[in-house]
Image (cartoon, rainbow, N blue to C red):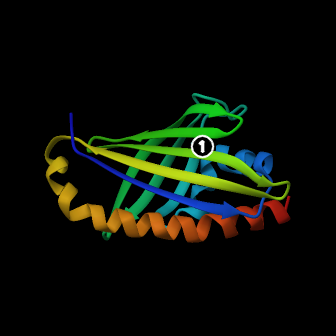
Amino acid sequence: MGTVITVERGFLVGVPLGVLVTYLEDFGHAAQWDPGTLRCDRIGEGPVRPGARWRNTSRFRGRTTRLEYRLASREPQRLVFVGENKTVTATDDMRFEAASPDATRMTYTASLRFKGLARFAEPFLRKEFEGLADKVAERLPAAAAAAAAGR
């Protein structure tokens, strides 16, 4: 089945709930808020809805990796993306709650399920994924606010 690392962060974003969900449902914006993402390109066209896909290129521990992500679920207060390649399945679960008319409380949970020999690396990677989650929690609110201000 594989080994799983799960990290979770909760934080306040100074953007209305609907605006934040609309921004984040386009996973192509991951390069703006995820410090590990180098680029994230949409595969296909049409409206962003469950089943929409992106090709994500990330750098972690000095290595470049590519995952194909899809929007697995879109609800008014929750987005779930699943990314896969030969060595890992990544799940990004984003939950939202209006904190005020102009701010949203967000809970971001990232789970990584390693496959094959990669599963043995989990004990060495957990601390680095925790640090990456901290950076997402720092960077995402500013990226979302900048995007909202520019719309």
**Whether residue 141 is situated above or below residue 44 in the rendered picture:** below
Quadrant location, the N terminus: top left
Residue 90 visible, this orientation: yes
Q: In which quarter of the image is residue 102?
A: bottom right
Residue 26 visible, this orientation: no
The residue singled out by tag 1 in the image is: 42
Q: Which residue lies furthest to the top in this view?
A: 51
Name which residue lies at 64% across and 33% down: 74
Image location of residue 113, percent across then percent down:
30, 43
Q: Label 1: state its secondary structure.
A: strand
Q: Indicate left or right for 12 with 102 as reference.
A: left
Image location of residue 51, percent across then percent down:
57, 28
**Whether residue 76 is situated above or below residue 6 in the rendered picture:** above
Name which residue lies at 49% across and 61% down: 37
Q: Residue furthest front?
A: 99
**Whether residue 66 is situated above or below residue 60 in the rendered picture:** above
Q: Indicate left or right for 18 with 132 as reference.
A: right
Image location of residue 105, percent across then percent down:
67, 55
Nearer the observer, 7 or 68: 7
Name which residue lies at 43% across and 59% down: 58
Image location of residue 81, percent across then percent down:
52, 40
Amino acid at dot 1: Arg
Name which residue lies at 63% across and 54% down: 106
Q: Disc count in the image?
A: 1
Quadrant location, the C terminus: bottom right
Q: How packed is label 1: few (under 14 Cα within 10 Å), some, or many (20 or more)?
A: some
Q: Quadrant of residue 150?
A: bottom right
